[in-house]
Image (spheres, helix red, strand yellow):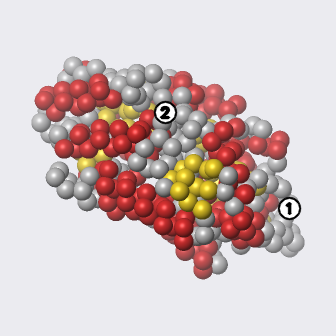
Amino acid sequence: MSRSWSRTSRVIAGTATALAVLTACGGSGDDSSAAGSKGSDGKPVTITFWGWAKGSKDVVDAFNASHKNIRVKFEEIPSGTAGGYAKISNAVKAGNAPDLVSIEYSSLPEFVSSGALQDIGGEFTEADRGKLLPQAVELTTLGGKTWAVPFDASPQAFFYRKDLFDRYRVEVPTTWDAFRTAAEKVKKADAKARIATFFPDDPTTFEAMAWQAGAQWFKADNDTWKIDTTDAATTKVATYWQGLIDADLVHKNASFSPEWTGSLKNGTTIGYLGASWGAGVLKGTLPEQSGKWAVAPMPSWDGKPASGMLGGTSFAVTKDSRQKAAAVEFAEWMSTTEAGVKARIASGTSSAFPATTALRPVARQVFDASFYGGQDIYALFEQSGAAISPNWAWGPTTGTTNTAIKDQFGKITKGGPTIADAIRTGHDATVAELTKRGLKVEG
């Protein structure tokens, strides 16, 4: 990740058009308040924060209770791909964006290149960044500038109903071949049950699996973007999942939809291919199933540990914010302090895997693992995090890529459009958008 992302940063910095966007369009704001000080009228500085991560309101409440000089007004918005990013973009265009927003690592380059954010390098110092996972720092560094405070890492994991796996005598799969065999056993044991779900509304889950397999969709080579969403690794993953869909071995429901949640509640979906943050989601969604779930590493192609990153949150200051220092102080408190991590995870709905490595023992201690039978899920996340492939980088058009893929994913049917067709559409849309922006593209 580190080497690949460094190359990506150099391309953005070295491309004349992109550099102009990154440095000229990124707002400087009029930061009239220093962090930790009151406003000129002696009253607390007030900042607004939009986000969707579990436990966010609890964190805001804890911050407001313990800080007198900064007050945070929080608004929960839909997750990024479910409308949150569109809401943020529209607010930036209208000039009424909040001070601080949640942005996943995959979407940060697009917000930076569109001029929606401020460089926060003056407030988020080298000493601050030194507390964090280096890969997360690089994911928030573009063109030599710092654009966000990393919050978590998000290695993949497989969540499964241990009681039903035992009842159906299904072994927890360690390879993708074994995963298909397990899927067949689940369907045979219960004609209505499936081992997992393909999410037609969420390209990021597929991208994480392509990442795990060794795909490299975006490559930076000097001043050129090389785009390839049809490499051997991606083709392998697409063919595999198309086979599962065609054989009716997985459900096809929108992520976190009533249909998906209902299938978890009634036991017709007994597994979830997610990420570290998914542990809190399941726990909060299915409290009546406490003790029935367990977590395993993601199946891999050769049985050896391998993971992509699914999501991962950072906090960024919008271009027109006048309270940059205060916004960064709050973001750092959320991400890099024991009190901030405890407040989020103690809410009972978050299983965040902090990018601040020293706080992972705190997260492990605070998280109530009884839902998972007392399993040390953070030890598993540590192993999975260490196995994240280092060769993936995000490009500056993730929104365009994902919208095109999502539109086609929704049309996938047996004998109709395929996953491979959808990925090709995403490839073409990406090349067209980069070309439109005046960037050099191969692909």
Say which quadrant the N terminus sits in.
top right
Instruction: Return the x and y of residue 265 as percentages of the image width and height.
Output: 27, 42
For the residue pair 440 and 95, the one nearer the viewer reads as: 440
**Tag 2's secondary structure?**
loop
Residue drawn at x 55%, y 42% is 392
Residue lying furthest bottom: 94
**Gap in Å between the C-alphas at discs 1 and 2?**
40 Å
In this view, which residue lies farthest toward the front?
Answer: 442
Which residue in the structure is indicated by mark 1? 34
| Residue 124 seen anywhere in this rendered image of the structure | yes
Task: Name the kind of residue labelled 2 in the image.
Answer: Ser
Q: Which residue is mark 2?
A: 307
Nearest to the eye among marks 1 and 2: give it.
Answer: 2
The one of 320 and 404 positioned closer to us in this rendering: 404
Viewer-proximal residue among 181 and 163: 181
Q: Residues within 10 Å of mark 1 (few under 14, many from 20)?
A: some
